[in-house]
Image: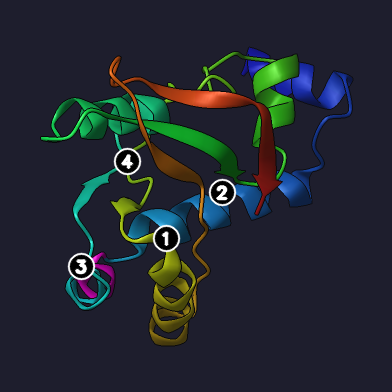
């Protein structure tokens, strides 16, 4: 359609890159949360959500709003399928960079003790063969605000 024509005209993606994006998206959506859920208990998770229709920031806000403690969530890393940010910025703003891009199945966002997060990620990757990332931090916040940090790193995967 018209968006693909703009992508080609602006030389944002090749056909091969578009195929790779589609493959990455399908693999991400097909990943089950069974192992991730089991490991959450082992590693002391205190809260979690699947990232779907509210986008990563919307789900982070929901987590912050539903805690007993007055907390917020600071997101310092946004994992994005390679080239999606370029498409978002140059062709069609689906609100990826501000955290409100609706996902069909964006994976799990899990809150756990900071000192256990890396071990959790390593064990889950060993089980599933798929990487995970530490994307933020739970912080004290009377406002209970989730936010994307100004110096947020876009991690193209």
Q: Compute the Cα span from label 1 to label 3.
A: 17 Å
Residue 7 appears left or right of 58: right
Q: Secondary structure at mark 2?
A: helix
- The answer to whether residue 102 shows anywhere in this view is no
Q: Residue at x 54, y 19 (%)?
A: 98
- Which label sits in the foreground, 4 or 1? 1
User: In terms of sequence position, does the residue under pointer 3 or pointer 2 come before the other?
Assistant: 2
- Which label sits in the foreground, 3 or 2? 3
Residue numbers of the magenta segment? 33-37
Task: Write down the quadrant of residue 59 in the picture.
Answer: top left
- Which residue is the site of mark 1? 114
- Which label sits in the foreground, 1 or 3? 1
Q: Compute the Cα span from label 2 to label 4.
A: 18 Å
Q: Compute the Cα span from label 4 to label 1.
A: 20 Å
- Which residue is the site of mark 3? 37
- Which residue is the site of mark 2? 22
Q: Residue at x 41, y 83 (%)?
A: 123
- On the image, the x and y values in percent for residue 83 come to 72, 39
- Quadrant into which the N terminus falls: top right
Q: Secondary structure at mark 4?
A: loop
Residue 106 appears left or right of 3: left
């Amino acid at each position: 359609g018209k968006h693909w024509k703009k992508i080609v005209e602006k030389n944002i993606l090749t056909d091969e890159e578009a195929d790779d994006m589609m493959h990455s998206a399908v693999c991400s959506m097909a990943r089950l949360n069974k192992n991730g859920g089991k490991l959450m208990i082992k590693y002391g998770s205190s809260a979690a959500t699947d990232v779907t229709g509210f986008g990563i920031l919307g789900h982070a806000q929901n987590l912050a709003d539903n805690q007993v403690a007055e907390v917020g969530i600071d997101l310092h890393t946004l994992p994005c399928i390679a080239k999606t940010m370029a498409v978002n910025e140059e062709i069609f703003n689906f609100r990826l960079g501000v955290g409100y891009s609706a996902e069909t199945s964006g994976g799990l966002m899990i809150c756990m003790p900071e000192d256990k997060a890396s071990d959790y990620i390593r064990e889950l990757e060993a089980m599933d063969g798929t990487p995970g990332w530490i994307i933020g931090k739970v912080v004290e916040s009377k406002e209970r605000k989730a936010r994307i940090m100004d110096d947020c790193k876009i991690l193209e995967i």
